[in-house]
DNA sequence: ACAAAAGTGTTTCTCATACACCCATGT
DNA sequence: ACATGGGTGTATGAGAAACACTTTTGT
């Protein structure tokens, strides 16, 4: 090869990381699947020297954003994502599941500089959430079915939409659900989690058929009966408890039919 | 919100785009699915002022890389990816299918600067390939089943692996295959394409069962019989020709069982 | 005539869904 | 006692795979 590619050393882009953090809260399954939003920082009137910029150019509509930070020089994406959760929402995200979603970097995304955001998806169990108070703005858990799309600033509506689609699709063939469920759970809870994230229709299935679908996983030792029943709540027989034995990267033996 | 986030305007990262371009060539299905590799540019001994860098720090092993370029200031990812194909392989990629794969930006990826690569997947039909000669190094179509993993420089092995997995997975539920097939094709070719990308086992199915699976698509007008037979080649009855009527973002009526 | 590949029809078996019935718990 | 939800077993229907057989091509 005759010519080796050269380029000036000068960096041209600013890196940011945004996180779409999902959780699953107890209660009606229609509102159970929730996403973390934080308040948009107030625009600062004018930058003073040394030249400073906001995380973004000001928005016309804004109100809510996904938690995000600008990256430090020697930081990994993963590290920056967890730092964003800590800084913007007071969430200790050391253990939570994190995967890259996509990178958003339209040249017109920010009027002042090339700001490229590497968006991530995070999954936490609601029982693991620690509520460290945060200095700037209150974090807000918003049901995915009731996202105020008009209030989302910048392109965060686009990011959130893609994140929702990704999780909805992936839940069908991968074991993501178990990152949202408590350590032990009943068949009903597993079913409700699936209904909340992907398809409400599964709530109309009989418990019999749900169980038969997971029977294969029980036989293969991926779902382990704990040997206890859940504490009774209200009327009705409490369900048998299971725990999940596998990795989040695993997949269902067959794709779920729903 | 009391504090608005500030940061110096100084960009800290260099953006690059790499493309994993796939095609499907006629012939034995085991070697049909191929990926485009190009020669690694020779390392330049020492940078002179004004300070210049290579696309990457030099590699220990290297030999082949994915086509990629550093991004211009006002360029979109999509635009840069098509430019990379033109510059590094002489491929006019204006019409080919392109989707973002993931972004690779480990801080230790390049020793001289923070180079972040937004990797893309591209799909072309082999009959649409124009072979404009390229100045630097010969482009090389390599069967996916025979990738010389050891010769891939930098983290391009990782990128390629992820790209292969993505396409393998997506082919099952989305209409990606039709971006790799010629404008008209037979059932056998459709089956062979699926076998090449995802699962050789489908070659053992009877033509009967294959046809029944696609019968639903024919009925719904997504596969349109052209009304001719393919030109006969060798012994055996030539297959009926079909063309695809739909968008690449569409999905199979049911996920393919294989 | 024969081999090879395409296409049609029928059978078999697996599995998702539906339904009928029993068990455990709180009111 | 009865309402409510969990759990077991059986029946039904759709569809994936297996198989037998016909049609079209080249040698």
Image: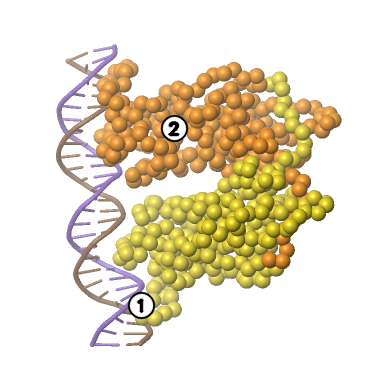
Chain colours: A yellow, B orange, C brown, D purple
User: As drawn, is A226 to the left or to the right of A49?
Assistant: left
Examine the image and state in which quarter residue B211 appears: top left
Q: Return the residue nearer the eye: D9 or D26.
A: D26
Task: Identify whether A140 is placed above or below B135.
Answer: below
Examine the image and state in which quarter residue B199 appears: top left
The mark closer to the camera, 2 or 1, is: 2
Q: Provide residue B27's location: percent of width, then percent of height.
A: 42, 23
User: As drawn, is A143 to the left or to the right of D6?
Assistant: right
Name the quarter where the C terminus of chain B is drawn: top left
Q: Residue at x 67, y 71 (%)?
A: A133
* Mark count: 2
Element under disc 2: helix
Q: Provide residue A38's location: percent of width, then percent of height.
A: 61, 63
Same-subunit check for callouts 2 and 1 = no
Name the quarter where the N terminus of chain B is drawn: bottom right
Residue picked out by circle 2: B179
Q: Return the residue nearer the eye: C1 or D6.
A: D6
Residue picked out by circle 1: A237
Q: Residue at x 57, y 57 (%)?
A: A152
Q: Residue at x 47, y 71 (%)?
A: A26
Label 2: few (<14), some or many (≥20) within 10 Å? many
Which chain is indicated by disc 1?
A: A
User: As drawn, is A73 to the left or to the right of B227?
Assistant: right
| Mark 2 touches mark 1? (CB < 8 Å) | no
């Amino acid at each position: 090869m005759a010519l080796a590619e050269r380029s000036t050393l000068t960096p041209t882009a600013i890196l940011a990381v945004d996180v779409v953090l999902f959780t699953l809260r107890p209660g009606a399954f229609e509102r159970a699947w929730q996403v973390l939003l934080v308040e948009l920082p107030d625009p600062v009137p004018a930058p003073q020297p040394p030249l400073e910029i906001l995380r973004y150019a000001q928005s016309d509509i804004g109100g809510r954003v996904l938690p995000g930070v600008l990256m430090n020089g020697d930081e990994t994406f993963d590290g920056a994502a967890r730092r964003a959760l800590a800084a913007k929402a007071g969430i200790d995200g050391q253990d939570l599941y994190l995967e890259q979603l996509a990178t958003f970097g339209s040249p017109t995304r920010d009027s002042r500089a090339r700001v490229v955001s590497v968006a991530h998806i995070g999954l936490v169990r609601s029982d693991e959430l620690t509520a460290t108070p945060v200095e700037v703005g209150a974090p807000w858990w918003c049901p995915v079915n009731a996202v105020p799309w008009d209030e989302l600033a910048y392109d965060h509506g686009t990011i959130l939409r893609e994140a929702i689609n990704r999780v909805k699709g992936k839940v069908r063939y991968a074991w993501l659900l178990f990152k949202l469920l408590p350590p032990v759970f009943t068949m009903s809870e597993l079913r409700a989690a699936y209904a909340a994230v992907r398809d409400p229709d599964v709530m109309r299935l009989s418990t019999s058929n749900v169980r038969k679908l997971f029977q294969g996983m029980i036989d293969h030792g991926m779902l382990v009966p704990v040997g206890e029943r859940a504490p009774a709540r209200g009327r009705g027989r409490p369900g048998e408890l299971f725990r999940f034995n596998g990795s989040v990267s695993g997949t269902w033996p067959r794709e779920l039919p729903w």
